[in-house]
Amino acid sequence: MRRLGLWVMVVWLGLMGSTVVAGDAAAGEVGKPGRRNAYATMMYMGTPRDYEFYVATRVMLRSLSKLDVDADLVVIASKDVPLRWVQAFETFIMYMGDLDLRSKEEDGVKVVSVENVKNPYEKQMNFDNRFKLTLNKLYAWSLVEYDRVVMLDSDNIFLQKTDELFQCGQFCAVFINPCIFHTGLFVLQPSMVVFKNMLHELERGRKNPDGADQGFLTSYFSDLLDRPLFHPPLNSSKLDGTYRLPLGYQMDASYYYLQLKWRIPCGPNSVITFPSAPWMKPWYWWSWPVLPLGLSWHERRRNTIGYGSEVPVVLIQAVMYLAIMAMTRLARPNLSKLCYNRHPEKSLMFLRTMLKMAAVWSILAAYVVPLFLIPLTVHPILGWSLYLLGSASLSSIVINAFLLPPLAILTPWLGIIGALAVMVNPWYSNGVVRALSVFAYGFCSAPFLWGSLVKVTSSLHVFLEREAFFPRLGESPQPPEFTKLY
């Protein structure tokens, strides 16, 4: 009887324990708060810069997650986005406090697969083909499982959390231009009615100044300029209607370059945007120190997804350049013999002209070729270091092949280092002083560049005139031993 009682007690405790665990699990599922808002962005294919925007999108979303925003992260991806990119979005890395502990969660970013919206404005005179698929942004209105959505372009840097934007109305945007709002960040209330109406307006050919999402939305919400400025209610309630957002939610990087500091009086200084020339986006390695804010973007990348995909390529190129420098130095005598005139019957003038052109193009290639070999989104410090190493190694080929003075060939190389040092100087009072300093440096270094060009030209002329390499036309090159017999 005693053993039976013990068994009954064990079974009863086990059942109670499993019930408690199951109850806790159920409570956890039921009590888990659903997120009613979302930060969304889009990803599509078909431009030469798809990979760069993919990296930029990942950095922006990871930056938002590190700010602990109370919203889902959504990527509206066209169906031709590579599967490995979709999987990278969906694998979310969570940073746990100050400890260097990370855990992976699936579905960290929700990916919504969509068909590309057909752009009816492709035949407009001013249409830019890189904006052909930007109308996919209209799918944000179809995310009806959310109360509010903040739609983002990938060239945004968040300085702080902006969850108060979810209190805004049916549509809210920032006027960077005094008369035209910017669609790099806007707030919307999803609605299938609005979404279908937008598609209908596309079919009927609503006026669109630029043929992209910017022109369509400014035409669709043409009265936004007359709407009041958004101020988040203190009771956390959501507003109705349309509102203008304060400039602090879309701070154009151009404003920073004038003063080298932010002076945005209206609203919090929360988000930086880069609506500049396509090839000066902050993720390109050459953007810094030309544009100082580029380093801010790369600091966010370093703290989120890192540079694991680019570092091996950088190391391989660095080893290759060092090997080139070593081999060209060891092979210097053999390289110079390549210029020996082995065909005296040919026109000496033509040969000299061709060799001069080859020398000039080789010098130019030494400074241009490394630009196209460096991974575009690598960290600027690595990018510029690799560029300087590459241009120096290729210049060594020219120096040793044509026996040119090293200092004259490397004068532009030294000038680039000086220009970078002038631009990176952190003690400028404002952007105007910085620009004038760069201009003054260029003005002062111009005579040295001209002098190096003259020196290279004269050295090349002397090299080509050497009879050891170029016997006079009509004379056969004879060894010294033959002449001594007579």
Image (tube, rainbow, N blue to C red):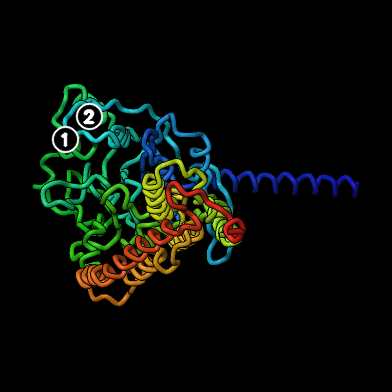
Residue drawn at the location 31% of the way across and 53% of the way down: 280
Residue 50 falls in which quadrant of the image? Answer: top left
- Residue 11's disc number: none
Which residue sits at x=37%, y=26%? 115
Give the residue at x 45% y 33%.
Answer: 81
- Amino acid type shown at disc 2: Met
Nearer the N terminus, badge 1 or badge 2?
A: 2
Please tell me which residue lies in front, 452 or 165.
452
Residue 255: give x, y in percent of width and height.
21, 61
Which percent across, then down, holds residue 101? 59, 60
**Dot 1: few (<14), some (14–19), or many (≥20) neighbours within 10 Å?**
some
In the picture as drawn, the residue positioned furthest to the top comes out as 204
Quick one: SS at disc 1? helix
**Residue plotted at (32% across, 56% down):** 162
Q: How many marks?
A: 2
Q: Quadrant of residue 300?
A: bottom left
Quarter of the view holding residue 136: top left
Q: Which residue is mark 2?
A: 198
Q: Is residue 69 visible?
A: no
Asked whether residue 84 appears in the rendered view, the answer is: yes
Q: Secondary structure at mark 2?
A: helix
Q: Are marks 1 and 2 in contact (CB under 8 Å)?
A: yes
The front one of 449 and 299 is 449
Q: CA distance from mark 1 to mark 2?
A: 8 Å
Q: Is residue 307 left or right of residue 52?
A: right
Give the vertical position of 447 relative to 483 (above or below): below
Among all residues in the image, which is located at the extreme front? 486
